[in-house]
Amino acid sequence: MNSKIKSVAPFVRYLLKYIVLSFILAPAYIPLNVYALAIINPLIMSSETGAPIESFTDFAEAVALGAARIAFPIAAIAIIVAGFLFITAGGNEEKIRRARKTFYWILIGTAVVVGAFVLAFAFKEFIENL
């Protein structure tokens, strides 16, 4: 029992040292000027122009743009995860198959979001030119 305590003690000292050090250096990371970011509700106002949404085509465009702004960062993270699965497969055929399947579905999901985005803008342009 005493040997377990001795083996944990260096880790605890190491951890406490970096926690105390982070509190000492924390003021260096606090910015002097803080700028507020205005987040526009995409279902009330167009984020591109700032004008209120007045038609269904503006609404469809705002929804597609909002979905794309959420989906693209998630897709980027998912592609990184799929790459990690490929790297950690280590020649195991089952893990490689699972990584390929993950990557395949990520690409399909991204293509669906891009397709919806393009269709919404094409729909808007078509309706406005009538």
Image (cartoon, helix red, strand yellow):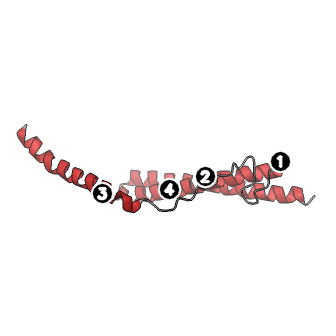
Tell me the amino acid under the disc marked 4: Ile
Of the numbered discs 3 and 4, the one sitting upstream in the chain is: 3
Q: CA distance from mark 3 to mark 4?
A: 33 Å
Residue count near mark 2 (Cα–Cα under 10 Å), binned few <14, some 14–19, many ≥20: few
Tell whether label 4 touches label 3 (CB within 8 Å).
no
Looking at the rendered image, the disc whose residue lies closer to the viewer, 2 or 4, is 2
Q: Give the mark nearer the N terminus: 4 vs 1.
A: 1
Residue located farthest toward the left when viewing the structure as drawn:
2
Q: Which numbered disc, 4 or 1, marks the residue closer to the eye?
A: 1
Q: Kindly identify which numbered label has been placed on residue 70.
A: 2
Circle count: 4
Residue 1: give x, y in percent of width and height.
7, 37
- Is residue 75 at all visible to an observer of this figure? yes
Point out residue 46 in the picture as x, y percentages from the top left corner: 75, 54
Residue 11 pos. (x, y %): 18, 50
Q: Where is residue 91, by image quadrant?
A: bottom left
Residue named by callout 4: 77
Mark 2 or mark 4, earlier in chain = 2
The residue sitting at 69% across, 55% down in the picture is 65
Is residue 105 rendered to the left or right of residue 47?
left
- Circle 1 SS class: helix
Q: CA distance from mark 1 to mark 2?
A: 21 Å
Which quarter of the figure is the C terminus placed in? bottom right
Q: CA distance from mark 4 to mark 1?
A: 32 Å
Q: Earlier in the sequence, mark 3 or mark 2?
A: 3
Q: Secondary structure at mark 4?
A: helix
Look at the numbered discs 1 and 3 and tell me whether their residues touch, using CB distance below 8 Å.
no
Compare marks 1 and 3 and give the one earlier in the sequence.
Answer: 3
Q: Amino acid at mark 3?
A: Ile
- Say which mark, if any, is on residue 24: 3
Q: Amino acid at mark 1?
A: Phe
**Residue at mark 1:** 56
